[in-house]
């Protein structure tokens, strides 16, 4: 059964979504990569003097563009969280939860080592790693590894917040 719109064009019936769009995209990219490799292997079997000089740069550019697309797709594939093939949250995760965790870790450290001391960066990374083990067991999102540069700016922010 097809549906007919006011424009008079027929459309295919809607199919049930048995497979997530992400799985289809992964399959498409994997198939595209296989076809690209097959094409490049076939191209390498052709003697170089049989390819017209004007066509060679175009073929190289198309191959490069397809390879670039595949790399970009794989790189950006992890820019969102998925659970069972369903996108949970698009874009980058906010640093608010990480900042709050670092504040709590520093408060504990200050109780033991003095109010003016901040936790050293290496110790902070170890503490975050231990905290992530607990969070993983609880099924919570893991905290990111904080760079020294970010941690230094957060220390300045914490100092100004406490005054």
Image (cartoon, rainbow, N blue to C red):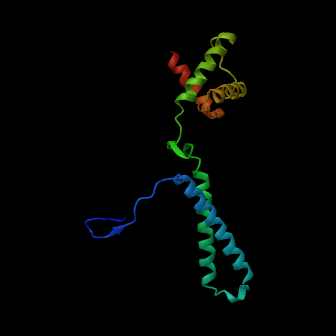
Q: Nearer the viewer, residue 106 or 130?
A: 130
- Image-quadrant location for residue 97: top right
| In the depicted structure, whether residue 163 falls above or below residue 74 | above
Q: Nearer the viewer, residue 161 or 133?
A: 133
Residue 62 x %, y % = 59, 72
Question: Which residue sits at x=53%, y=41%?
Answer: 92
Residue 93 x %, y % = 53, 37
Q: How many marks?
A: 0
| In the depicted structure, whether residue 108 falls above or below residue 140 | above
Q: Nearer the viewer, residue 145 or 11?
A: 11
| Residue at the limit of the structure toward the left, as seen here | 6
| In the depicted structure, whether residue 39 falls above or below residue 148 | below
- Image-quadrant location for residue 5: bottom left
- Image-quadrant location for residue 65: bottom right
Question: Which residue sits at x=52%, y=20%?
Answer: 160
Q: Nearer the viewer, residue 54 or 18?
A: 18
Residue 41 x %, y % = 72, 75
Question: Which quadrant is home to the N terminus?
Answer: bottom left
Question: Which residue sits at x=65%, y=13%?
Answer: 110
Instruction: Give the left or right position of residue 14, taking residue 111 as reference.
Output: left
Residue 27 x %, y % = 60, 59
| Residue at the limit of the structure toward the front, as seen here | 1
């Amino acid at each position: 059964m097809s549906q007919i719109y006011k424009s008079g064009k027929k459309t295919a019936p809607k199919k049930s979504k048995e497979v997530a769009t992400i799985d289809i995209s992964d399959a498409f990219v994997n198939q595209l990569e296989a076809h690209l490799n097959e094409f490049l292997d076939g191209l390498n079997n052709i003697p170089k003097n049989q390819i017209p000089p004007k066509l060679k740069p175009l073929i190289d550019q198309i191959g490069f563009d397809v390879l670039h697309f595949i790399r970009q797709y794989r790189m950006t594939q992890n820019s969102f969280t998925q659970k069972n093939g369903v996108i949970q949250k698009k874009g980058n995760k906010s640093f608010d939860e990480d900042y709050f965790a670092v504040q709590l870790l520093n408060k504990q450290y200050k109780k033991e080592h003095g109010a003016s001391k901040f936790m050293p960066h290496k110790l902070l990374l170890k503490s975050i790693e231990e905290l992530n083990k607990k969070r993983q067991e609880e099924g919570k999102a893991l905290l990111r590894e904080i760079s020294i540069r970010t941690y230094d700016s957060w220390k300045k922010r914490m100092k100004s917040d406490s005054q």
